[in-house]
Image (tube, rainbow, N blue to C red):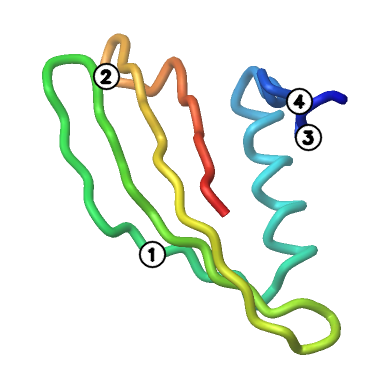
Amino acid sequence: MRAQPPVNGAVYSGKEAVTRFWQDFFRESPQAHIEIEEIFGLGLRCMMRWRYDWVDAAGKKGHVRGVDLFKLKDGSICEKLSYVKG
């Protein structure tokens, strides 16, 4: 049996691909709410802990929590890894 979603997740490279992902995400989930619960950085790394709440098409509420690990290069995010617990 394989883990779902895929263990290494999906890769979105470049500003256009990342922008398209988030536009599609919020278009498909208009009641989505993401709350940053904690954020801190050290050097060229940053960690953000968050909670994502939604309401599905049937009106049922749900949520998951997760963390994003960021890597910076030349003042911009060059890598983001997301981990979800739901």
Comparing labels 2 and 4, the label whose residue is closer to the camera: 4
Which residue is identified by label 3? Answer: 4
Per the image, the residue denoted by label 4 is 6
| Above or below: residue 74 compared with residue 59 | above
Amino acid type, mark 1: Glu
Residue 67 coordinates in the image, percent (x, y): 40, 41
Residue 34 coordinates in the image, percent (x, y)? 47, 63
Task: Report the amino acid beneath label 4.
Answer: Pro
Asked if the residue at tag 2 contacts the one at tag 1, i.e. Cβ–Cβ closer than 8 Å, the answer is no
* Mark with earlier residue (2, 3): 3
Is the C-beta separation of discs 4 and 3 under 8 Å? yes
Find out whether the residues at labels 2 and 4 contact each other: C-beta distance under 8 Å. Answer: no
Along the polypeptide, which appears first: circle 1 or circle 4?
4
Could you say which disc has been placed on residue 35 in the image?
Answer: 1
- Indicate the amino acid at tag 2: Gly
Q: Which corner quadrant of the image does residue 26 belong to?
A: bottom right
Name which quarter of the figure residue 16 lies in. Answer: top right
Contact (Cβ within 8 Å) of mark 2 with mark 3: no
Distance between the alpha carbons at the discs numbered 3 and 1: 25 Å
In this rendering, the answer to whether 37 lies above or below 9 is below
Q: How far apart in space, not on screen, are marks 2 and 3 (Cα)?
A: 34 Å
Secondary structure found at label 1: strand
Residue 1 falls left or right of residue 76:
right
Task: Work out how far the residue at label 4 is from the one at label 3, CA to CA, in angstroms.
Answer: 5 Å
Q: Are marks 1 and 4 in contact (CB under 8 Å)?
A: no
| Residue 73 vertical position relative to residue 7 in the rendered view, above or below | above
Quadrant containing the C terminus in the rendered view: bottom right
Q: Which residue is mark 2?
A: 75
**What distance separates the C-alpha of mark 1 from that of mark 2?**
24 Å
Q: Nearer the viewer, mark 3 or mark 1?
A: 3
